[in-house]
Amino acid sequence: MRNRILEYFRKANGAFVSGQQISDDLQVSRTAIWKHIKILKERGYVFDSSTRKGYRLLHAPNLLTELEMQSVLATKSFGHKFVYRESLPSTNALAKEEARKGAPEGTVVVTEEQIAGRGRLQRGWFSPYAKGIWFSAILRPHFSPLEASKCTLMAAVAITRVLRAAGLTEAVIKWPNDILVGKRKLVGILTEMDATMEEINYIIMGIGINTDVARVDLPQELRDVATSLLLEGVRVSRKELFAQVLLELETLYFQVEKEGFAGVLEEWRKLSGTLGREINVISATGTFSGVAEDIDADGCLLVRTPDGVERVISGDVSIRNKEEN
Ligand code: BT5
């Protein structure tokens, strides 16, 4: 109901809307409308009211609440179950709890800030209030657990598509889970899974996108390694970008469930900033350098070294400067 009421004000575009008209159209009492407006005010919406003309919306909060997202979300199922918290330790942690309790595929957990945001291997993820999109999506795919790591590549392709369409044409994917502009990281992806040998119970795709992070917001250790849309000069509305990311993710995921990962891997190759480059690799089997040649059908990175081709299943890659060669 609250969203339907908000819809009137959005359509009016700052003009007055009569409470009587809303109450007639929606068949609820004037008092009920007034109560909903009171709750909206508590949530950061600012209204002007006039006894003769009704109400007009002066300001809607720039937050990723369900109410705000509903007006822009165009997905079939992703985000239809929407878990919003103003602050969380980590959206991946809450998404895991939700998944264990049986939350349906496409459930999205989102927050304005994470106080214990996580990267891979116990690393942290800096997630300041309302300066990025920090969210996790629950998937319950039918493919084998062996395919799961390719969900990271799928998410990277979906987000890069959106970033490029928003004007950030230099966004490239660094294997396996980063999106970079130049050498700086704009997006990080953390894919986690619960599975038996035979089937996947659930996958949590955790995604962090720096949108409005300014240089002064960044802790010292991230100043030379992180960037944001704001720092790259691309102005976007967080909620619209988030809606587009969910739509692209859903589209690619439905395609993968139907046709497999081949199309995603092909597009990944085109959007990659890693292939063809001299890289350093730190993996479970050791540290080495070589040229990133390709990814294989499992999404593993193939690196040409003087001793032959190394297949990297997981690890950290850094792209070498020309001077290092
Ligand atoms: C990642 O790990 O890049 C995965 C990040 C996933 C974050 C999302 S946010 C929503 C969801 N909930 C969570 O708790 N996490 C997910 P990794 O490749 O290990 O990179 C981590 C490294 O990136 C850190 O050690 C820092 O050097 C750097 N870093 C941390 N915060 C950053 C930020 N906001 N922007 C750019 N780089 C950052």
Image: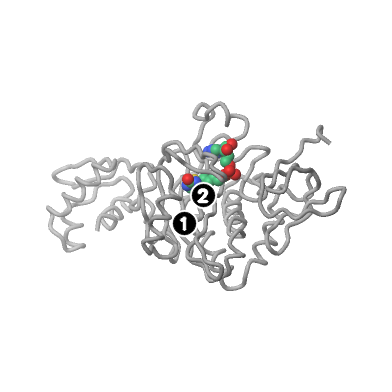
Per the image, label 2 sits on a secondary structure element best described as strand
Given residues 49 and 155, the one toward you in this image is 155
Label at residue 137: 1
Placement of the N terminus among the 4 image quadrants = bottom left
Q: Residue at x 47, y 42 (%)?
A: 117
Q: Are marks 1 and 2 in contact (CB under 8 Å)?
A: yes
Label at residue 207: 2
Q: Give how far across and how far down residue 162 sits, in percent.
A: 57, 52
Of callouts 1 and 2, the N-terminal one: 1
| 29 to the left or right of 136 | left
| 82 to the left or right of 177 | left
Mark 1 crowdedness (10 Å alpha carbons): few <14, some 14-19, many ≥20: many
Q: Up-down: is 3 above or below 39?
A: below
Given residues 317 and 59, the one toward you in this image is 317
| 45 to the left or right of 171 | left
Q: Give how far across and how far down residue 208 sits, in percent.
A: 51, 45
Disc 1/disc 2 C-alpha distance (Å): 8 Å
Judge: label 2 CB < 8 Å from ligand 1: yes
Query: Label 1 sits on what residue type?
Result: Ala
Q: Residue at x 61, y 64 (%)?
A: 147
Per the image, label 1 sits on a secondary structure element best described as strand
Q: Is residue 131 visible?
A: yes
Name the residue at the right extreme: 306
Q: Give how far across and how far down residue 182 sits, in percent.
A: 68, 39
Query: Label 2 sits on what residue type?
Result: Ile
